[in-house]
Amino acid sequence: MNEENIIYSCLEHAELALDDFVNNEEKAPQLEKIQEEKKCSYCEKAAEYKIEA
């Protein structure tokens, strides 16, 4: 999977991330809870979810 098609999200921005993914990719996303240390794509908090096709 291409890293540019992945959105990382904290709990606060999960709904926004899902909406953005659907609007940009025009397909249903997969939401995966992650343990790896990534930053939210919308703020500086630790990401809890990875959204991808």
Image (tube, rainbow, N blue to C red):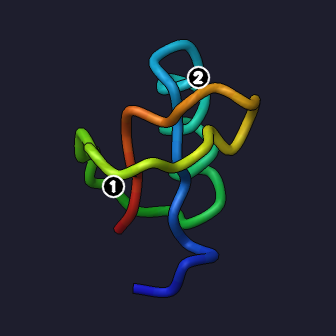
Residue at 74% x, 31% y is 44
Question: In this view, which residue lies farthest toward the front?
Answer: 37
Q: Which mark is residue 16?
A: none
Residue density around tag 2, few if under 14, some if 14–19, many if 20 or more, within 10 Å: some
Residue 10, percent from left and from top: 51, 26
Question: In this view, which residue lies farthest toward the bottom?
Answer: 2
Residue 13, percent from left and from top: 58, 22
Quadrant assignment, res 41: top right
- Whether 34 is drawn above or below 10: the answer is below
In the visual, does 27 lie left or right of 44?
A: left
- Whether 29 is drawn above or below 10: the answer is below
In the foreground, 40 or 25: 40
Q: Which residue is mark 1?
A: 28
Q: Which residue is mark 2?
A: 13
In the visual, does 11 lie left or right of 20?
A: left
Which is in the foreground here, disc 2 or disc 1?
A: 2
Residue at 75% x, 29% y is 43
Element class at badge 1: loop
Question: In this view, which residue lies farthest toward the top?
Answer: 12
In the foreground, 4 or 37: 37
Residue 8, percent from left and from top: 52, 47
Quadrant where the N terminus is found in the figure: bottom left
Residue 11, percent from left and from top: 45, 18
- Does the CB distance between marks 2 and 1 fall below 8 Å? no
Cα–Cα span, label 2 and label 1: 17 Å
Disc 2 residue type?
His
Disc 1 residue type?
Ala
In the foreground, 29 or 10: 10
